[in-house]
Image (cartoon, rainbow, N blue to C red):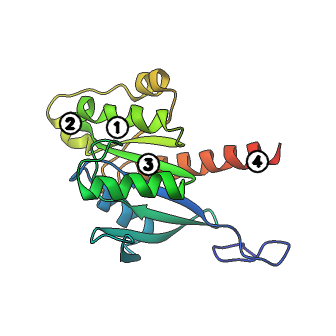
Amino acid sequence: MSQGCHAANQQGTLKATVKIALVGSPNVGKSALFNALTGARAIVSNYPGTTVEVYRGKACLQGRDFEVIDTPGMYSLLPITEEEYVSRRLLMQERPDLVLHVVDAKNLERSLVLTLQLMEADLPLILVLNVIDEAEALGLKIDTFMLRHKLDIPVIATVGVTGQGLAALREEVMSHHGRERRKAAV
């Protein structure tokens, strides 16, 4: 019998849910990736004490439950706006198992400041270069292998609205999850 999401493990309890937070500037395609990962099964809630909405959904990858959180747009971990404050608080208090920093590939240089801040905060991170098709149409060439090597974090190129790169993103999420489970077992 296949073990799907919500299946009991050998001890008869539900598998622990892995928490993934999508972060990035406004209008970089976080919501498109959220919808692609969750099938748009979202629960909208206001973060406690604010009017800022946080979207939460469930994803099932290789029989494993994941909670996916679409955070409000942020440019920095040093908050100026209420949205940035909520996103920072969520990251620091909930400490997700994995952070997907979604950036507009056309404006990569501007977004790397937040990438470095997330790394300094010791958050487990994958850099997602979204709308890579638009960057390429403008003649921009991004060497994801070199960027991955320089930053020492996974870098995946995607187009959230078409699904390009989503298989690689899902594979990297599962690879990260496998590494974390092995570390915890040691």
In the foreground, 79 or 143: 79
Percent across and percent down for residue 146 are 42, 21
- What's the mark number on residue 9? none
Q: Are marks 2 and 3 in contact (CB under 8 Å)?
A: no
Q: Residue at x 68, y 67 (%)?
A: 16
User: Which is closer to the viewer, label 2 or label 3?
Assistant: 3
- Label 4 belongs to which residue? 184
Q: Are marks 2 and 1 in contact (CB under 8 Å)?
A: no
In the foreground, 15 or 7: 15
Percent across and percent down for residue 119 are 47, 34
Q: Look at the numbered disc 3 and give the secondary structure of its residue.
A: strand
Question: What is the CA distance from the residue labelled 2 to the residue labelled 3?
Answer: 18 Å
Q: Are marks 2 and 4 in contact (CB under 8 Å)?
A: no
Label whose residue precedes the other's in the sequence (2 or 1) = 2
The residue under label 1 is which amino acid type?
Leu
Tell me if residue 54 comes above or below residue 138 in the rendering.
below
Q: Look at the numbered disc 1 and give the secondary structure of its residue.
A: helix
Q: Look at the numbered disc 2 and give the secondary structure of its residue.
A: helix
- What's the mark number on residue 114? 1
The residue under label 4 is which amino acid type?
Ala
